Amino acid sequence: MSDSKIDLDPIRALTDLAVEKDLRELEYETSEQRIRIVRQDPAVAVAVNPTPVAAQATMPANPATAEAEAAGAAYIESPMVGTFYAAPAPDAPPFVETGDRIHKGRTVCIVEAMKLMNEIEAEVDGIVAERLVENGQGVEFGQRLFKIAPAQ
Amino acid sequence: MIEKVLIANRGEIALRVIAACRDLGIRTVAVYSLADKDSLHVSYADEAICIGPARSADSYLSIPAIISAAEIADVDAIHPGYGFLAEDAGFAEICQTCGIRFIGPSPEVVRLMGDKVQARAAAKNAGIPILPGAEEPLKSVAEAKTWAKNIGYPVIIKASGGGGGRGMRIVRSGGEIENAFQQAQSEAVTAFGNGDVYLEKFIERPRHIEFQVLGDKHGDVISLGERECSIQRRHQKLLEETPAGSVSPALRAEMGDILSKALASIGYTNAGTVEFLMDEAGELYFIELNARIQVEHPITEAVTGVDLVKSQLLLAAGQPLSIVVPRPVEIEGHAIECRINAEDPETFAPSAGLITKFAPPNGLGIRVDSAAYGGWRVPPYYDSLVAKVIAQAPNRQLAIQRMKRALTMSAVEGIKTSIPLHLRILDSSKFISGCYDTHFIEDWGL
């Protein structure tokens, strides 16, 4: 699976299977990718939207990315283990606040790992719906940092 | 004292370290990759931190991720287990810089032992017997020829930075040396990024004998006897036993003396294993020193009663060896370990996947070190070790009997394992005789 092209065939096949067997949830994993289908009654909602799948191609083993919300909300996840900082300096205002409209590439926080301040950029456009971690908190790889609601 | 330890590893060794920490009342922090989120080390540690994706390079081998996890968890020591970063001198050094104890030897000693040519020279200077051969990397084919002529064929050309059989060539006559030299060199560049090769005498039918050592930070080093590890396939050990039939009590005592003096002079601390080749005449020659806990450490624990991992923690905390391991240490009975791998017993192809049923052996004289469970999926990203079965008995014959009993009174379903191969080894007359060498498996055509 290339980075630019989404292979919809396995998603279609799994969706069909989920409907056919009346499964609530179906997870399919290879060394390359992981696809999770979650059904919501009565219709089938495919819990994989195009953006996370594309990210999935570059970050194969990250299940959280594939678990996008049916509602279209996205999450900014920590790409590394470290300490979360909402602002560039202790007395500075935070990079983003709830309600801010952000664009892909916007710095949203810092994760400090081994004394290095890593600026974390948004991978999607949207509105900051919620900050999910405290300033100065330790965060794991893949931990959700912000909930991003789709821009209208 | 150490109060909180991060375990920079996974699988059974992570559980082994957690167990030792619990025995000492030390808090534990597990780190894991996304592929290991359902692992037992994650649930058994007091805390667990996800450090990266499945790929080892981005998780278990990522120094920034591990140090960062150690900092957010505020640990005072890191146990590296075996493999991954266990023998990475740079990692040991960074731990030191960050004020975190690295549970192992000093970075200088780890670095020295990581370079085979330097390690060999250090061993020789310290009075450990080594195979006759070149001590410096060979500069040319001509130089290799001169050395080979002086030592006598066969000789072996090896990569300085290597291990695991890569960059090695056996040369049986002068006509073969030029090709062998060039092949070893180019393999060494590809595998280790360093084309340095050296040469030494080649033993046709060697035994692989290794000695367990422990050292404190006050210059005291003890040897806890040997392990016979000749049952190997492509330099991967399959079965180990102790004591070795080929090592007499007198030789064991002599080697113990040599090693404790030599390693004290090198400044060796914590646990280590000194590997030797034994020739057909019973002479031992140093190959390398593994500056870490070894997979097969439980057989030494079985016959000595010494908890090696607990000792590592206490020695790292600065306790004197005389208190950690009161002497004399007696070797009692016999112990055998079988490494149960997730692989096809005939083709040796890895067999990752879902373990549908897991009923490990138990009963008198049996110990199982494993991180597997029924419903666990063996990930395809890491080594194939599923369980270590250790049989202990008053004598070798009974230990073999107990191991056979254990392997036939256990079940691992859903994946293929090496158990049939282990049973075949245990049933072979050559193994039962105790007279075998590193060609044991190869002689079967496997």
Image (spheres, coloured by chain):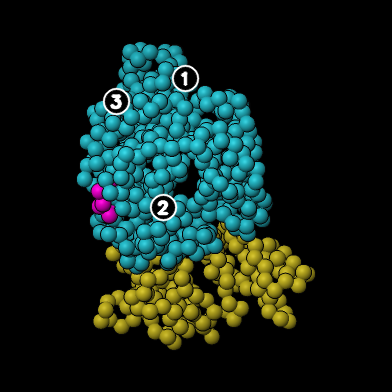
SS at badge 1: loop
Q: Which residue is mark 2?
A: B61
The residue depicted at 55 percent of the width and 66 percent of the height is A63
Residue found 40% across the figure and 58% down from its top:
B23
What residue does disc 1 label?
A: B204
Please provide the residue range marked out in magenta: B316-321
Label 2 crowd (10 A; few <14 / some 14-19 / many >=20) = many
The subunit letter for the residue under badge 3 reads: B
Q: Chain of mark 2?
A: B
Q: Nearer the viewer, residue B405 or B20?
A: B405
The answer to whether dots 3 and 1 both sit on one chain is: yes
Please identify the quadrant where the N terminus of chain A is shown: bottom right
Q: Which residue is mark 3?
A: B135
- Mark 3 / mark 1, whichever is N-terminal: 3
Q: Chain of mark 1?
A: B
Q: Tell us which disc is closer to us: 1 or 2.
A: 1
Percent across and percent down for residue B287 are 37, 30
Q: Amino acid at mark 2?
A: Leu
Q: Which chain is yellow?
A: A
